[in-house]
Amino acid sequence: MALLVVLTSSLLVACMGSSSTTLDDQGASVSSFDWGLPDGIPLPVEPDDNPMTEAKFQLGRYLFYDTRLSANGDIACASCHHQEKAFTDGRQFPTGTWGDTHPRNAMSLGNTAWFATFNWARPDVTTLEEQIRGPLFNSSPIPEHGLTSSNLDGVLASIRTDSTYQALLVAAFPEAATDTEWDFDDHLIPALASFVRGLTSFDSDFDHYLQGDSSALSAAAKRGLALFASERLECTHCHLDNFTLTDNHMNRSWTYPTSNFHNTGAVYRFDEPNRGVYEVTGNSSHLGQFRTMSLRNIALTAPYSHDGSHATLEDILDTYSQGGKQGDYQVDGDLSPGFTLTSDEKADVLAFLCSLTDLTFISNPRYGNPWPDADGNPIGVASNAEADPAVNPQCQLSNP
């Protein structure tokens, strides 16, 4: 544990640098929400205009699994974010309500309350509320839920006249108890954001190790952790070895780094529609920069990278070991120098990555589908991809 504590302290200082943003957190100070966090996990930031409540969390859970929030009544948030896959979908690219293919891999939703940004390549999207609005209403890069001015009234009418939602809305927004004009901006999106913000995952073997149980990690995983945190692999330059395992991180007690988008050499072309932060800024130095993802539950969230181009964790290690993918646009070796691992060392790193799996998170009924019918949803099935085994076979390791 001493090694981890020392490394964490030094890396936090190094990665924060001098560029940071101070947070106003009045919303958190008035929240009565029970986060249920283990010792050592700091409370997250809550927005001033949408502090957490249990009633909003529960309303958001019903909305998250409801296919009525789409133009064709066939897409729910849960269609691309399955609990058993740590709220990803197991596919390279998700599809929208009109059958269009999204160019980006579906993100995991665990521990988003501690994230500073929420989009693969949009540093300007800094709240969950704004991020959730995108899939519902945006047509670029594809119409996901496909909500527009032409179908919005029908969707809202279905929600407003549902007795289940009427009770949930009154509980979540008692100040509007007599309001029959519940809408997305003031009610549904804040509730969805509250549910997603409340999805916490802190019950992995790695968490028990951080909390003082030295036996929680195997010898192989401990060796893998040491390699992960070493200058030789440099994983922790972006995936900080703290509880978030990403530099895209903030909490109530400290400021956070504003640069959590990087070009690591994991892509070899910057053609549309995957050009990274450049798509927002037009700055050529931002080509190929994408957000650092948390590694929590990483064994459950294949395929990997913003474009889902890596099928396994071993593929990811191989890509980074060679300093990025080969090709005309490979990142300069000085920026992504690569490394060499023996087969045993690679197995150790994989053992550590597998120790980040939280089986409680993917089976917790609090986060599951609340609808009572056979399909778990009032109209249709919210999930349109078959479930895989709970633990990726790549974690069936024999390295002691």
Image: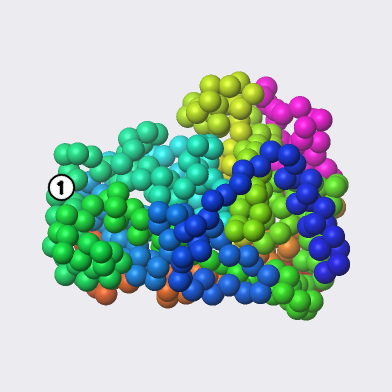
| Residue at x 77% of width, y 32% of height | 335
x then y, percent, for residue 281: 53, 25
Question: Magenta part of the protein: which range?
Answer: 315-341
Q: Amino acid at mark 1?
A: Asp
Residue under the image location 67 percent in, 62 percent down: 243
Note whether residue 303 is visible: no
**Magenta span dominant secondary structure:** loop
Residue 242: image quadrant is: bottom right
The reply to whether the magenta stretch includes residue 399 is no
Image location of residue 221, percent across then percent down: 77, 66
- Give the position of the C terminus as an image quadrant: bottom right
Magenta segment includes 320: yes
Q: Is 26 positioned to the left or the right of 285 in the image? A: left
Could you tell whether 154 is left or right of 322 in the image?
left
Is disc 1 placed on a helix, strand or loop?
helix
Q: Quadrant of the N terminus?
A: bottom right
Can residue 54 be seen here? The reply is yes
Residue at x-position 59% and y-position 38%: 290
Q: Relative to 345, is 297 on the left or the right?
A: left
Residue at left offset 37%, top offset 33%: 140
Point out residue 100 in the picture as x, y percentages from the top left corner.
Answer: 34, 38
- 304 relative to 30 in the view: left or right: right
Q: Nearer the viewer, residue 293 or 102?
A: 293
Q: Toward which corner of the image does residue 251 lie, by quadrant?
A: bottom right
- Pick the front one: 307 or 146: 146
Q: Nearer the viewer, residue 327 or 162?
A: 162
Name the residue that disc number 1 marks.
153
> Is 335 in front, or is 90?
335
**Label 1 CA crowd tier, 10 Å (few <14, some 14–19, many 20+):** few
